[in-house]
Amino acid sequence: SVKKVRPFALAAFARGLRFDDESVRELMQLQEKLVLTHGRRRRKVAVGVHDAATVRGDLVYKAVGADFEFTPLGWDRPAPISKIMKEHEKGREYAFCLNGRDYPLFCDGEGVLSMPPVINSQRTAVKMRTTDLLLDVTGTDWEACNVALNILCHEFAAAGAKIEAIESDGRLAPETKPHEMLLSLDGVNKLLGVAFKPAEAVKCLRKQRLDATEKNGVLACLTPRYRADFLHPVDLIEEIALGHGYNSFKPKQPSMFTKGSVCVETLQEDKARDALASAGFVEALSRVLCNEDAAFKALSETRFVKIKNPISKEYGSLRGELLPSLLGLLSANTHNPYPQRVFEAGEVVVRGGKEGTQTKRHACAVACHSAASLTEAAAALRHLLESLGVADYALHPCGENRFMKGRQARVMIDGKAIGVIGEVHPQVLENFGLQMPCVAFEVRLDELPYA
């Protein structure tokens, strides 16, 4: 089922275009840059552009097996999908997006239009004489797909095309109704250091092509659906600053001289990074905002803090530990050579404290290869703790679901648990699509003494 691979598919027609060599190159560049950045190298969103004159009948989005045959773009004869993924340039480049599971196909009444996110069909290739286009957008997040389709439709509309929406699962695409974001005028003035009046702030937003109204000190701003960069009210404050003009802000001399220095927490994190890097691990940098699904797949017992009104499901929670993020990273790199050893030292958010949540600092390392063992992880853990000035610690057996029974332990210092180490459970490996054994440990840096 496509729901398990790439659950969302949107489409629209752009009719009445004229192409030459330059416009074809611009179209290809727009498509590639869009899926590279907004689409996260096609993993999150992929775009297909087809000659609409070759499309017949109803559009169907389905999943097929690796033995299904069609003629990919650039080839002159049909081939099984398994061969396309191994021998076609785009198949090799984007195989990591599918990981050998069922393969999604976008089809019409005569056959295959595209195999997202990899390659289009040769039958629907865009030519110089093409005047009408079919745009297909597939991905793992509906709103991200809608943004991509809006961007394409606005570009083609600006070039004189007529856009025709297509209904999918009872929803017309692209959806163009703007989102409303609320912004406190006091917050604007505090951050920018300028006493804007309501009418002035609204004028600045309208200079940036953002409609806005003001009521009781609150700005109601309408953000267009082809803009994917409005994640927080501070993004609107930036638009006000741009509308006002950066050169219009008057610089102010600081009233007090201060001298900064690196805090002990940062020094400790840097020591942890140096220790794990010297042990052969490569540092990863993942977001504190995350998708809670990764925690479920990792069989985590930590309750992640959820965001009340997330912009996207991909960033609907705050991570409570680092291991799910690293397993997700390894899952996205199964096409790269092994062994793979990665680590991260950074912030997590846990429940508790006066405010209901607390920010903590963790360090986590994972080794993934055919010979990965608890001995390897224990050696790296010892090296890390000794580098942080901890020579006396103990490992006590524990029973967490995410690790294999009898091959896991709590890391104890002075009778207090400060972390965990173990061989990752096969069910977790299967959930992340990993075919190699993994060993991991994660420690709470806040619980360690500052060396």
Image (tube, rainbow, N blue to C red):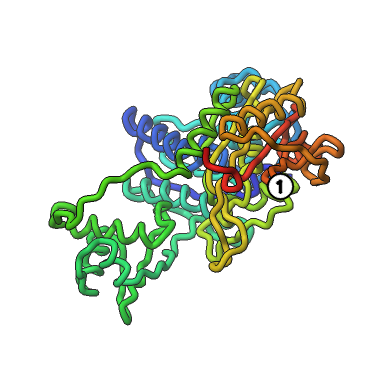
Taking the image as shown, residue 142 lies to the left or right of residue 38, namely right
Q: Which residue is mark 1?
A: 417
x and y, in percent, of residue 258 in the image: 25, 50
Residue placed at 45% from the left, 41% from the top? Answer: 266
> Residue 394: x and y, percent?
74, 37
Q: Residue furthest right?
A: 406
Give the amino acid type for the residue marked by disc 1 in the picture: Ala
Q: Quadrant of residue 402?
A: top right
Query: In x, y percent, where is residue 108?
Result: 63, 42
Quadrant position of the N terminus in the picture: top right
Where is residue 109? Give x, y as percent: 65, 42
Seen from the viewer's position, the closer of residues 1 and 75 is 1
Which residue is rendered at x = 57% and y = 30% of the image? 387
Residue for point 71% across, 31% down:
100
- Vertical placement of residue 423 versus 257, above or below: above
Q: In the image shown, does 71 or 300 lie closer to the viewer? A: 300
Figure disc tally: 1
